[in-house]
Image (cartoon, rainbow, N blue to C red):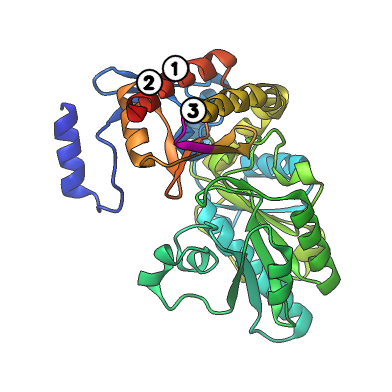
Amino acid sequence: MNKENYITSAEENLLHTYNRFSLVLDHGKGVYLYDTDGKEYLDFAAGIAVQALGYGNEEYNQALKNQVDRLLHTSNLYYNVPVIRAAERLAAVSGMERVFFTNSGTEAIEGAIKAAKKYAYTRDGHAGHEIIAMNHSFHGRSLGALAVTGNPHYQEPFAPLMPGVRFADFNDIDGVKSLMNDKTCAIILETVQGEGGIYPADAAFLKEVRALCDEHDVLLILDEIQCGMGRTGEMFAWQHYGVKPDIMACAKALGCGVPVGAFLLTERVAKTSLAPGDHGTTYGGNPFAGAAVDAVLGIMEREDIPGHVREIAPYLEETLDTMVETYAFLKERRGLGLMQGIVCEKPVGAVAAEALKQGLIVITAGSDVIRLVPPLIIEKKHVDEMAEKLHAVLKNMAE
């Protein structure tokens, strides 16, 4: 079939919950994607921060092929070797003690919320606890994750949501303090807000939130679904700050294309929160997903992917800063590592669409941010190529 026939079939059979670009992708190699017409695209979106290792990594692919031939699924009634190895690696790189594997980031958030509520229930002997979340946050689209997502646009059609969620402004510690009460069981936030516009946490804010949690025996939940797995130059963004969460959610690049997420807990929280029967999943942590996580973490450690990010990120930042200085409708760059955003007064959806015509894939965040979250294996030459293509788009828009 040609591209138009594929798109027609998709629109006839898939639920229309995505406004997709008119592009049918076929395969990838390195940091490039190719459509069904054979056109090449430099990928600075990485499947929304998923394809950290790019496309066609032989070691990763072989690990999955080997596991397909060996064992795909057993359920969690039994142990399996790949997920045990994956849990060992993930606990080691995160400094957390307990891991629960899920199928997605949204499910990781759901589990984190349940763990926090169960911790407070065990501590106090009653339910009815509250959570403080952040305005402009994004934690997923299931009902529990929506309840802690600070964007009314996503929430309104699905009300009433989980009660007992109160919202503070990100990086405003006084706002957080004003919401604290004896019902508060957790504070949840993204270490770097993604969908809300690429806002890193202020160091002072994150440290004060940690201190506030310690003072009141409230759990700190950090959402590292997008900003984790080496993207910021540390394996997890909170490691820049020296602020360890009580519960952490991760996904996206954890499987580099295989759907898998996880929430992690400290031993202290694990001991007095979720117990047998409190939480479960049929597919989460199956051998195939475990093999993917094991391979990803092994490659990242051996090749020091976070170290490479620390080397290349300043060059990307410098390149983007030059763009901001060049075009009056670009207002600022913000971000951390290879999670960058440019605030743009032109329609950012149009920027992304025009970039495709130049053979460049970028995405957006919020209503006014061009988001760049490329594979973590990019080199300076790829930054230069991205800049050339994006300049062509921005120059036309400036005229």
- Is 329 inside the magenta-drawn segment? yes
Q: Where's the C terminus, which quadrant? A: top left
Which residues lie in the magenta part? Answer: 327-331
- The residue positioned 77% from the left and 65% from the top of the image is 269
Please give the count of numbered marks on the rendered protein.
3
- Is 40 inside the magenta-drawn segment? no
Q: In the visual, does 369 lie left or right of 236?
A: left
Most foreground residue, 121 or 318: 318
Position of 220 relative to 90 (above/below): below
Q: Where's the N terminus, which quadrant? A: top left
Q: Determine the image quadrant of residue 205.
A: bottom right
Q: Report the mark closest to the observer, 3 or 1.
A: 1
| Distance of label 1 from label 2 (alpha carbons) | 6 Å
Q: In the visual, does 53 lie left or right of 85?
A: left
Q: Which residue is mark 1?
A: 388
- Residue contact between numbered discs 1 and 2, judged by CB atoms under 8 Å: yes
Position of 322 relative to 248 (above/below): above
User: The residue under label 3 is which amino acid type?
Assistant: Lys
Residue 276 visible at all: no
Residue 145 placement (x, y as % from top left): 51, 63
User: The residue under label 1 is which amino acid type?
Assistant: Glu
* Secondary element type, mark 3: helix
Residue 299 placement (x, y as % from top left): 65, 26
Mark 3 or mark 1, earlier in chain: 3
Mark 2 or mark 3, earlier in chain: 3
Q: In the visual, does 12 lie left or right of 46?
A: left
Most foreground residue, 335 or 268: 335
Q: Which residue is mark 3?
A: 65
Q: Which residue is mark 2?
A: 392
Q: Report the mark closest to the observer, 2 or 3.
A: 2
- The residue positioned 37% from the left and 34% from the top of the image is 352
